[in-house]
Amino acid sequence: MADKSAARVIIDGNVQGVGFRNFAHRYAFLLSLKGFVKNLPSGQVEIEIEGDKDKMNLFLEHLHRGPSLSKVLKVDVTWGTYSERFKEFSIIL
């Protein structure tokens, strides 16, 4: 069985209004990860994610790059325990 994990990710930089949530949603879907992405009032983007640890690490690599119009300055990851609390990956408006 694959090693499962969970993480809370905060992305800093020019990451709102540039398609970052759709970018994260697309890669999470392709990698079969579950969770959500949302904009924060601070200008950051928050992601909660669960799934296969190797796929999560690949997802995090994509987050460091971001969509073409974004400028990612920092990706802060707090690892947690896999809980199966998400059924899919959603964009929270």
Image: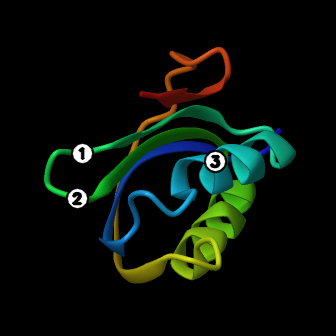
Left or right of 42: which side holds 79? right
For marks 1 and 3 on the same chain, the one whose residue lies earlier in the sequence:
3
Instruction: Measure the C-alpha gap from mark 3 to mark 2.
Output: 16 Å
CB atoms of marks 2 and 1 within 8 Å: yes
Determine the secondary structure under disc 3: helix
Q: Nearer the viewer, residue 90 or 34?
A: 90
Left or right of 66: which side holds 80? left
Q: In which quarter of the image is the C terminus?
A: top left
| Direction left: furthest residue | 42
Residue 56: image quadrant is bottom right
Determine the secondary structure under disc 2: loop
What amino acid does circle 1 point to? Leu
Q: Indicate which disc residue 40 carries.
A: 1
Q: Mark 1 packing: few (<14 Cα in 10 Å), some, or many (20+)?
A: few
Relative image position of residue 71 (x, y in whole percent): 44, 83
Relative image position of residue 44 (x, y in whole percent): 27, 59
Q: Mark 3 points at which residue?
A: 22
Depicted 52 relative to depicted 64: above or below = above
Instruction: Measure the C-alpha gap from mark 1 to mark 3.
Output: 15 Å
Q: Mark 2 points at which residue?
A: 43
Q: Mark 3 packing: few (<14 Cα in 10 Å), some, or many (20+)?
A: some
What amino acid does circle 2 point to? Gly
Relative image position of residue 77 (x, y in whole percent): 36, 63
